[in-house]
Image (cartoon, helix red, strand yellow):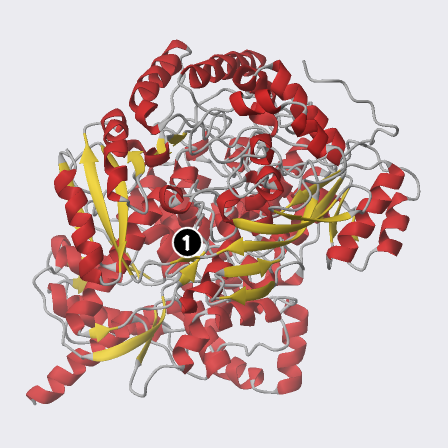
Amino acid sequence: MAEQHRPHRRPTAEAPDGFAAALRSAVRGEADFGPTARALTTMDASNYRRVPLGVLAPRDADDIAAALTVCQEYGVPVVPRGGGTSIAGQATGTGLVLDLTHHLRSILALDPAARTATVQPGVILDDLRAAAAPHGLTFGPDPSTHSRCTLGGMIGNNSCGAHSVAWGTTADNVRALEVVRYGGEALRLEQGRALGPHGVRQLIDAHLALLRTGYPDLPRRISGYALDALLPEHPGGPDPVRAFCGSEGTLAVVTEATVRLVEAPRARALAVLGYADESAAAEAAPGLLPYRPLTVEGMAADLVREPAGLPRGAAWLFVETGGATPAEARAHAERILRAADAVGGTVVTDPAGQRALWRIREDASGTATRMPDGTEAWPGWEDCAVPPARLGPYLRDFRALLAQHGLRGTPYGHFGDGCIHVRIDFDLLTPAGVSRFRSFSEELADLVVAHGGSLSGEHGDGQARAELLPRMYGDELVGLFGRFKDLWDPDGGLNPGMLARPAPLDTNLRFAVLPEPGRPVDVEFGYPQDGGDFAGAVRRCVGVAKCRTETAPGAGVMCPSYRVTGEEAHSTRGRARLLHEMLAGEVITDGWRSTEVRDALDLCLSCKGCRSDCPVGVDMATYKAEFLHHHYQGRLRPAAHYALGRLPRWLRLAAPFARPLNALACVRPLAALAKRLAGITPERTIPALATETYSRWLRGRRGKGTHILSSSRVVQLWADTFTEYLSPQVGRAAVRVLEEATGRTVLPPPSGVCCGLTYVSTGQLDAARAVMRRTLDRIGLLPGHPLVVLEPSCAATLRTDLPELLPDDPRAHELASAVRTFAQYLEEYAPDWTPTRLDRPVVGQTHCHQHAVLGDAAERRLRERMGLTGELSGGCCGLAGNFGFEKGHWEVSVACAEEQLLPAVRGSEPGTEVLADGFSCRTQLDQLAGRRARHLAEVIAEGLDREEGAGR
């Protein structure tokens, strides 16, 4: 058994008197012991939760050494943390969390000739790859979290990724390390130099036979300490760097790493091979390795949201090839396609097509958290590895074990390396379910070992598997792990409970602190995807942190506030963590009245981007509205909630006085006073009111379309607040186009209808429901007729918020299903109509709500038919309805616009059409860039005017 080591001063889980002051005086970085910082770091991407004492963002290696010295003096444990995407619990801790992402993010040197880079531990992998790319180089290991994981975290976990069949694990690609031990001692690790602290060499020499026979030989053996790397016969001599990689922050803290770079192929191709099931794909994978592919990845149909681009089959291998030219890469992929015994296959050379397919695979870590019926699934046995030749039989035995325990899971992952990812529908909410989690874990560990495998093949042991290491290595070798840990960390202060002397795998589960099942939190929205359970909705965030991507992911939206601030509290994950802790009541203690949660949600733009871009469908806009409703219930709200949240009411009252009110708004002192009273930021200009509303224009219209002959020849066009009172020209253009294209008559809208958007976004949910019910009473929706909505935010509200706030009203669901965007309606009801070709480039914004809820495929096809070329910006314009007008949001609002939209518009050529279907997007462009953007309906109407003028 592992030896019981008793340090002279065992670290405590409670901050001793004077510790915070001593730490702050010793370091230059920011030390935060407040509830927000602690709540944000209670969890990683695992099933586990540990509450830290505080968080330190060290500025440099000296800060780390000073902090570890103070922590040893006071007996406070330490856990280093990078992106927080570990899935075995090793990035959580009960003492001081070292946030290495805040300051330690520099690439210190990059030597193309030597093919090395020296980096600080907080460097994001994609940043290193981007720096190496101009030299034709890259860092080989590339886990699916490459856009947000750090090099320090990769070293701690010995991360791998899809390209490990070509370039190996992180341990294969690290040349030297600068580390600091608990207590502040700095060491340099490099092959051929000292093996580490005093006593390590003697420990190895005394157990040579055990170390030579105790480790399985397979490419993805990540479990335990790699002490066999310290054997004298190791190629190149004993390698302390390799032995350190995968130590999960239990030995020392990395302050600097020199890593190997590899030559990146100039061209790549992707062979996608279809198989009958994942076992067939697994058995085929080893036969492809002699062709030296860059990847052999596998996944099954259960994890595919959109099968577009995939060949026939129920499971697929993604086999990437490289070459000096596109033709060479394609020829390599075609050779593999011919050699593979697949039921279907295709070779993709287009980079955009390859990225789209890889996104399917990379999002699996999130999509796997929900079974097809919506049941939750969890990590814990995420990445076992067996010899590749054993993968097929192992998967069949694994499936049988799942069935024996009444569990479900869909395997996917690195088939070429025998490493399988899977999320399983464990019940981690009840004692019986947790008991089954333990018994399954023990039996699966035995099954993996029986196939010659490793309990961890990529993400480390952490708390999830370290308890079971004796089943893989035996008690004697695991005892040696403990002695190795003690030589490095005799006080036991670094990440206690991980790897050596681990905590039991069924303790510290993050769900135990949430409200008990069967006792849901009293909420306003229906949460139909989560059984009406707000806690279940919050549990959706499993921590994969796609929201922490700091560069715009193409057309993606999530998460604009994080990309601007870089603060965890302003990421979707951070806000979900705070809501989790609010429900737990341990760190955040005042529930719905929490100022910590309120402040974190304050910079949420309610863009809804996470609803579509988050792999698990976290919907922070809805959670924010829910929180604001409860937070301000019975209390005075911010002025902007009354002014902007109730905007439809004020605009309706103001409409008859549009001319004098517009004149008064031009008087600066009066405008400044109005903005101050309304809680509007002083930098904003108050938009002008329309002197003639859309409804008034339509009712007073003469000529074409005024006589309705048949209810089957009409169009129901929603008169949203923005079109009605602020931009009626959009409505007029839409009427012109719809009637020309369909031969139908646009009906005048009923009075007093509103989708409730502004009430929802400010959390005035009682008022929102009242507005929505009044709308349902008055709208008179014609059976079988779609409802055309020009404003994307209003369309999204009707499609999602309406039925979720009125889940028991069938009229709400009927109206939601009737909603169409302008382009969707034209495509459905005028498929043969040909708009005027304008043949000009376009720039502008796809509305974030449209991206998240409605999709823009019809708009893209319509623009293509008109010869409008170019891509619209993703992200969020930053105005986001009331957000950009509210006091305190100006800087973030502008920064969001500067992230994609404004640079694209400024960089456009003369004559480029600026498109933005959303009123917020058009307003932002007008106020920040001085450019008038138009709704697509206005552009099409211009084409009709041109045709009509040419015909005269």
Quarter holding the N terminus? Answer: top right
Does residue 150 appear anywhere in the picture? no
Q: Is residue 357 left or right of residue 100?
A: left
Residue 588 screen position, x and y as percent? 72, 39
Q: Is residue 131 left or right of residue 225?
A: left
Q: Residue furthest front?
A: 233
Q: Is residue 244 above or below residue 482?
A: below
Q: Is residue 48 left or right of residue 946?
A: right
Residue 385 screen position, x and y as percent? 42, 28
Q: How many marks?
A: 1
911 and 314: which is toward the camera: 314
Q: Secondary structure at mark 1?
A: loop
355 and 297: which is toward the camera: 297
- Residue 339, quarter of picture: top left
Does residue 290 appear anywhere in the picture? yes
Residue 950 screen position, x and y as percent? 9, 88
- Residue 692, quarter of picture: bottom left
Which residue is under mark 1? 755
Q: Is residue 243 above or below residue 843?
A: above
Q: Residue at x 47, y 53 (%)?
A: 147
Give the residue type at disc 1. Cys
